[in-house]
Every structure is written in structure tokens, then in C-alpha cells.
Amino acid sequence: MRKKRTSLLALLCAGAVLLSGTGVASADVEPGYVDQFSDLALSHYAYDEMKDLLWQKTISGFSTSEIGHVEVRADHPTTRAEFVTMLVLAMGLTSDAGGKKFTDVSPTDWYYNSVRIATAKGIVSGVSTTRFAPNDPIERGEMATLLVKAFAPTVAATGAARSYPDIASYWGKANIDTVTRMGLMSGDETGKFLPAAPASRAQAATVLYNALHAEKTGLSADQEIVSVASSYYSQYMELINTGQLSGLNAIHSTYTSGRFRDKWDGTTQYLLGWQAKGYNVSIAQYGTEPTTFTLINKTYRLAQIRVTRGTSVIRWSHPETGHEGADFRMLSGLLYLKRSPGVSPWKIYRIDITP
């Protein structure tokens, strides 16, 4: 019987398409697997920051007609509800407490839980005792205050103080002084802080990205972080080679999060479909040298691991039809990990693949 060969590359790519349906998430529409912006140029000052937060699922975006792409509307104002939600997601905050009650925040609102958690933890309050004003643009001074309250335990305020001529009588002057010394915010090119100016979505993403990368206390041991990546790789290969593809979802739940999980959950569903059709699937490392995992950076909640020689060969065959093939799976490059202290351990949320 003549054997028919095909490439698995299309299968792996198609795995992402399986998750292309949309559902409402907060004010945005969040596709299952996205990694591209339709309205943000590479040259934009916040491109890298917004891309990383997109992979984390700290931000989602607005759906477009193109699969895998979203609009982030970087220069649009950020509302108070949006920023509080971003802050809660970025820090992985949870709470069972009721939080403060506001007449303009209902349990059916998409931002309700974020407001509840942030108020319960004393990070944010309303514009009055009864109103939260969720749809008002958040002011830069308000954003500074929330950052100080949220990150003071993990980000040291050891930088040089700055004097801004427009904050002398501003109610949040002390917090602006502190957030400047923390290195999380600064003024404009004229030397003003502009505390009452609305913060854009790009500015909000940038300050949260900076805060997550400035947390230098309470760091995890190197091996604790590296073992997540090495365990994920070894268990992934073992499950495929023993035909236990249904177990892949469990290790994704254990070791992955964010868009990385969306991506490989889709691939898993595709492989399960082929297994159901009678195909045998196996995976092996390409080459003889072992894969290495090197921690190159860590903060309180984030880490990066460089993976070398992580390329694998996936083979599949049908014992009756003779249909078979093989393809490479590139998993060398930078792995990005995140944890939510007290809630979840380190998990892989992003990969930048290099040959």
C-alpha cells in the first residue's frame, strides 16, 4: 500500500483556529487565541508592554474580523473600571470579602468582582461614599494613588524625588511623590505631571508592566521556577508517547496560563481528534543534546527562562491506511512565567520562539 504523507504544521496552526469564537469579557470582546494587534504599530512606545499584558490576559482587546488579531485602542482613555480590572488581573488578586457597595456598581456588571476585590483590599475607593464612577476616565493622579497602595509592599521607593509644578495643591501629591520614587510614573516633556489628565490605555498598560517588573522582594528560588518549564516539557512528551493525549489538558492547567494555554489547548483538541480517527501520535526530541532551561530574569510575579535545543519531532501514522508524516515543533526561545502569590504557582503564559 502506498503511504500518504502530510505535514502536521497545518494541524498545529489549525489548533488555534478552534478557539476563534468570541465571548464577552469585561468591556472588551476576548477571542480565544490572539497574539497580534490590528491597530498598534511596532513603533508605538507601548507595543511591547501591551503585547506582554495581552499574553498574560491582563488586557484583552476588542474583536476584529481577522482571526488572531484584536484592537487595543491604545490612545483611548482608560476608565476607572478598566484600570481596576487590569490591576486586579495583573497582580492575580482574589478575596472572599464583600468589598464596598456603590449605587453605580451592580453584581451584573463585568467589573463588579474587580471593584469588590480592590475595595476589599483597600486599594481603591469611590469618588464619594456611594459612587464609584466606573465609566469615568481615570486620572493620572488617581492611577498613581492606586499603584502606591497596590505595589508598596513589593516595589521600593528608593529613586530620586521629582518636583512637579502642577501638583503642589493636588490631593494626591504624596502618592505622586512616592510613585515617582518607585520609578513607575513620571511627568511629561515640559516637567509637569498632569495629575488631572485622563490616562490612556497605553499609559495604564505601561505603568502596570513597569510595576510587575520592579517587584524585587520575596523572590522565588531559581529551581522552583525552572522546574515548571522542565516538568511541563517532559510530561508533555511522555503523555503523547504513551497515547494519553487526554491528559494534556491537565498538564496545561497545571503548568500554563494566559494565551499560551489557549494556544496549546487548541492544538491538544486537534490532536485528540486525530487520535479518535485511529492515528498513532509520537514525539521525540530532535538531536542528541539535551534541552536546557536557564533562568535569566525574575521578579516577585514574573520570570523568563531561555530554552535551548527544545525542538521536537512529532510523528503520526494510521496503521490501516498507511497515512503518515512528521513535522518539527519549535519550542526553543524565551518562556515567560507568572505566578499569583498565595493563589497559584508559577505558570507559563507566553513563548517567543527562536530557531
Image: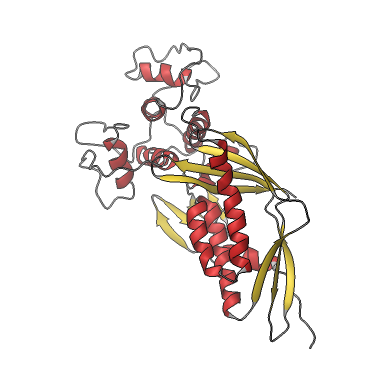
Instruction: Name the spot of residue 182 as percent of width and height, x first.
Output: 47, 21
Taking the image as shown, residue 22 lies to the left or right of residue 269, namely left
Q: How is the image coloured?
A: secondary structure
Side of 149 relative to 306 (left or right): left
Task: Pinpoint residue 346: horizontal percent, then vertical percent.
Answer: 50, 44
Q: Position of residue 103 (x, y in %)?
A: 20, 42
Q: Residue at x 34, y 20 (%)?
A: 172
Q: Evaluate whether residue 240 shows in this view.
A: yes
Q: Quadrant of the N terminus?
A: bottom right
Instruction: Please give left or right for residue 10 compared with residue 120 in the image.
Output: right
Could you tell whether 26 is left or right of 12 in the image? left
Residue under the point 28% across and 42% down:
116
Q: Nearer the viewer, residue 43 or 264?
A: 264
Residue 19 visible within the image: no
State the count of labels.
0
Most foreground residue, 129 or 349? 349
User: Which percent across, then down, holds residue 85?
Assistant: 38, 42
Furthest toward the right, the residue is: 2
260 over 282 or under it: above or below = above
Tell me: residue 28, above or below residue 318.
Answer: above
Residue farthest along the bottom direction in this orientation:
1
Q: Residue at x 37, y 25 (%)?
A: 145
